[in-house]
Image (cartoon, rainbow, N blue to C red):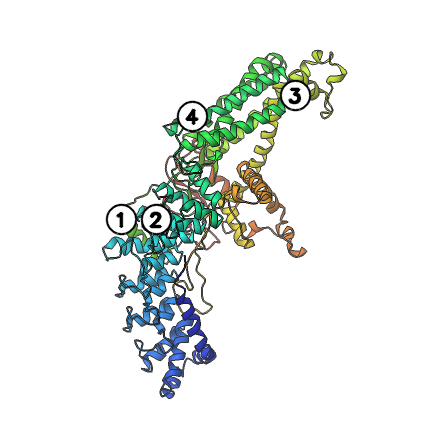
Amino acid sequence: MDNMPISHDENMKKTSNGTSAVVDVAQHAASDSDNNKAQLLGIESDTEFVIDIFIEAAKDGNLKLVKDVVESGAVDINNDCIDELPGLHWACINNRFSVVKFLLLRGANPNQTVGSERATALHWAARYGNVYIVDLLLKHGADPTLKDGQGLNIMHFSVYSSNILLVVYVLYFVVNNSNSVDIDSKDNNNRTPLLWAAYQGDFLTVELLLKFGATVALTDNRGFNALHCALVGGDQRVICDLILSGANFNERNNQKQDCFDLAEGMGTKSLFEQALQHHGYDRLGNQKDKLFKKSSYAQFTTFLSPFLLMVYIYLISLVLSPVLAIMLSLLVVVVTVNTLKKFILPSFPRKNTYRVSLTRTPFFSGLFLSTFCFLIYIWTEKLYPYSVSDYTMKNVQFLVTSFFTIILFLKLVRSDPGCVKTDDSLTSIQETIKQLIHLGKFDRENFCVETLERKPLRSRYSFFSGALVARYDHYCPWIYNDIGLKNHKLFLFFALTVQYHMFLFMWLCLAYFKKTNYIYEQVDEYARCALLKNETLCKGSNYDPSTFFLFIWVSVNFMWLGAMLIVQCFQVLKGITTPELFTLIREERRAKIVSLIPFENSMCSSTSSRDYDMMPEGPTGTTVTHTISIDSLEPRNKRRAILSACFSMIGINQWFVTIKEMLGITHFLHGQVQQQHHSSLLRSFLVTNHWKTNLTDFWLNSDVTAPLWQRLFYSSDTSKAMLGGIEVDYYELYEYPAREGEVIRSN
């Protein structure tokens, strides 16, 4: 994408260098507030010098000095562009809200076009993603239909800023308000906003433009369509979105290059091929027939596949030696997983995801249920007959926990995690945006760009549910559902029940192995184990390998589930969720984390050291985050990425972080001074309720009229719950309730 509109930035740097010599003078003038006007009137004859002071004050956000200059009459605010850019433009560039507001109220022309590019103040504000300034300019008569010298209008500049919030604002208050700004408006090179967004790799912007009906088939002067631009930009999610929207990947540009040629030359061939495969095409772009016409059939097949694996492993364990059985089992598992990815997963729906992974399918819930069924089968056939006389109560407990395990599992799979209902009408969204702008909270912390709704405190958008989930904690592949406000307590009941159920099974397995010692007396020398030093386990592995394999599998799950329960209980005591814990750690460490899936970056505006403006100072543009494909990484990084994804799925990363925080050694591990290693991040966490209050908030629902046992064992069907001992509505929680000794915090 050549001929990029960078001349604006070059002009800004050039003109700023010309006035840098008066920075000290402007600051000195600002420091003497009593004599500003007198000084300015005394040097009225030096018009250029006064304008330089005025320009620097506008840049710096020094409202006091700007007022003194304007009110003294020393500067005409509509004729102050000695350096090609007037004070209003500079204030818009630097996001000086109070200065812009003052100048507009004093009659500054928001549609004045200056500079070599003939850009207005609105163009500059949009270029730097200053949504509050854009809103202010439009309210004071700025014309959104004007174009600069390169044919760029407010829609182009909004996309170019990479601020998704500004794109949302322009789409809902400019494009949708019949202001003659077309969503497919073209610049002098025939590039539309969609082409710019695809080139920049802004997947959120691309999705929003497509939602508003942006045309995919349009091309620029070089014959590049949106998919061509996306292949140059190299973002896989953008590529997937455009293919799904019908982009023609066989179309050739003016250099006779189609998407395959362009991807080869730009090094994005693997991303393009993966996107094609994801949407049912082969590497040559030919449509492949899906194995299942209905996605529900694919989901059911994926759910059943672990049952077939379990049957296979059980059968080969009866006829083969343990070592050979393990090797063949691992081989079949690998073949099954790859078969699912290649033939079954392409039939899954593409809703809310750009790439289907095995963790986002019912595979792991089927693995849990198949394990549970074989566990019951082994208990019925082998463990119960040998242990019922000596361990009657253990068998009764096993039967009872089995019943509760299956009931809780089925409830969790079908449960609502607390999805916030949304109103996607034009009027509702516009009112929400207006309200947030008025409150100064139109940012990613308070506005969800996926659902276009105000984001309640402690909520998070879930790609799995396709909605905001109140008090979101995590996605659990074992129950194929999100964990949030309405099912978090049920999930912990389930996890504790499963943990005790596995403990009972392991107990009964060991009792079974010991009870059958008379069989082991006939063990030959060659059958003794080299690795297992425990004689009971050794003989069990040789003479009942199917039970032994299940015992090992359950033991492994018992250990990692125990680690997860430690993490969950720790977070309940602290009154925080998993995202809140990791957000706190990221903020405190200021670490740069690369994720395999898109994550949200807060558009926190940096405030000026001087308290001149009430609105946020500095650009509010979001950092563009690109999706990373594991297959496109180098072999070493690929192994690390896969290992990291596995750790994340089973919760090991959470366990390590929690243990480090409990021991207070994170500072030390990050190479900081030894005197600081005893401190813990959680000591400075803002939600500092007593642990008893946190336990009450989590385990008891907000219905104080119900008996205590009902409050404990029943989850609320409403959005109301306890927070700090006070009932709150989590669907409308925009401010934390006041608590003794704490400052009220709002979102």
Q: Which mark is residue 426?
A: 1
Cβ–Cβ under 8 Å for marks 1 and 4: no
Question: Nearer the viewer's eye, disc 3 or disc 1?
Answer: 3
Q: Amino acid at mark 1?
A: Leu
**Whole-percent x, y for residue 713 in the image:** 45, 31
Question: Nearer the viewer's eye, disc 1 or disc 4?
Answer: 4
**Whole-percent x, y for residue 57 in the image:** 40, 75
Q: CA distance from mark 3 to mark 2?
A: 55 Å
Residue 446 visible? The answer is no
Residue 664 visible? The answer is yes
- Drawn side of residue 385 relative to residue 575, left or right: right
Q: CA distance from mark 1 to mark 4?
A: 38 Å
The residue identified by callout 3 is 322
The numbered mark, 3 or 2, whose residue comes first in the sequence reads 2
The numbered mark, 2 or 1, whose residue comes first in the sequence reads 2
- Front-lying residue, 119 or 271: 271
Q: Residues within 10 Å of mark 2 (few under 14, many from 20)?
A: some
- Drawn side of residue 83 relative to residue 544, left or right: left
The residue identified by callout 2 is 208
Q: CA distance from mark 2 to mark 1?
A: 14 Å
The numbered mark, 1 or 4, whose residue comes first in the sequence reads 4
Q: Which SS class for mark 4?
A: helix
Cβ–Cβ under 8 Å for marks 3 and 4: no
Cβ–Cβ under 8 Å for marks 2 and 4: no
The residue identified by callout 4 is 300
- Front-lying residue, 430 or 456: 430
Q: Is 201 drawn above or below residue 142 in the view shown?
A: above
Q: CA distance from mark 2 to mark 4?
A: 32 Å
Q: Is 641 drawn above or below residue 397 in the view shown?
A: below
